[in-house]
Image (cartoon, rainbow, N blue to C red):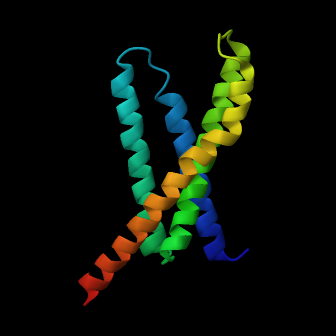
């Protein structure tokens, strides 16, 4: 692998693990649940923004490639969160049928990666135009 390939792949892995970590850790407190959810969304949004900006200005990728990498990271994070939920469901009795947790291993990454891709394409195009306008 070449160095740039390692850089984007490392960013995808790092951000994906951050998303999974944020999803698990911010769900642990049992008080002020809405506040913790909001904090998780904001923190994940910051990771997403940093990833898009890094791909755009650090690695100089196209909007499509930025979106693909961002969607991969988000999908990885959603998969890790689904794994954590499935493990938790296997260990703790629940009224939710277990097949739903196994289905989440497939559905959560898709449901999160598709919007992440669309938003990153738009952000990449807008950032590219902004950079060109600023350079001129």
As drawn, which residue projects farthest toward the bottom? Answer: 136
Viewed as shown, does residue 79 lie left or right of 127? Answer: right
Q: Nearer the viewer, residue 124 or 6?
A: 124
Task: Report x, y in % for residue 114.
Answer: 55, 54
Residue 16 image offset from top left, x and y in percent:
58, 49
Give x and y (percent) for residue 53. 41, 66
Residue 51 position (above or below residue 95): below
Q: Name the quadrant containing residue 13.
A: bottom right
Name the residue at 58% across, 53% down: 73
Q: Residue at x 54, y 30 (%)?
A: 24
Quarter that holds the C terminus: bottom left
Q: Nearer the viewer, residue 4 or 23?
A: 23
* Image coordinates for residue 104, horizontal then vertical, percent: 66, 34
The one nearer the camera, 4 or 113, is: 113
Against 8, is 61 above or below? below
Is residue 28 rendered to the left or right of residue 75? Answer: left
Counting every numbered tag in the picture gives 0
- Residue drawn 40% across and 30% down? 37
Is residue 50 toward the left or the right of residue 81 in the image? left
Q: Quadrant of residue 31?
A: top left
Residue 75 lies, with reference to residue 7, above or below; the image says above
Q: Quadrant of the N terminus?
A: bottom right
Task: Please indicate whether residue 66 sits to the left or right of residue 130 in the image.
Answer: right
Residue at coordinates 33% horizontally, 26% vertically from top-left? 35
């Amino acid at each position: 692998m070449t160095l740039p390939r390692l850089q984007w792949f490392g960013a995808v892995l790092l951000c994906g693990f951050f998303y999974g970590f944020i999803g698990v850790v911010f769900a642990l407190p049992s008080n002020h649940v809405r506040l913790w959810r909001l904090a998780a969304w904001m923190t994940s949004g910051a990771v997403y923004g940093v990833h898009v900006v890094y791909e755009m200005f650090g690695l100089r990728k196209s909007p499509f490639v930025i979106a693909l990498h961002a969607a991969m990271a988000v999908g990885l994070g959603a998969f890790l969160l689904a794994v954590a939920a499935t493990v938790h469901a296997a260990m703790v009795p629940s009224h939710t049928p277990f097949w739903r947790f196994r289905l989440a291993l497939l559905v959560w990454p898709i449901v999160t990666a598709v919007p992440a891709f669309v938003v990153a394409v738009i952000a990449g195009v807008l950032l590219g135009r902004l950079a060109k306008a600023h350079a001129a």
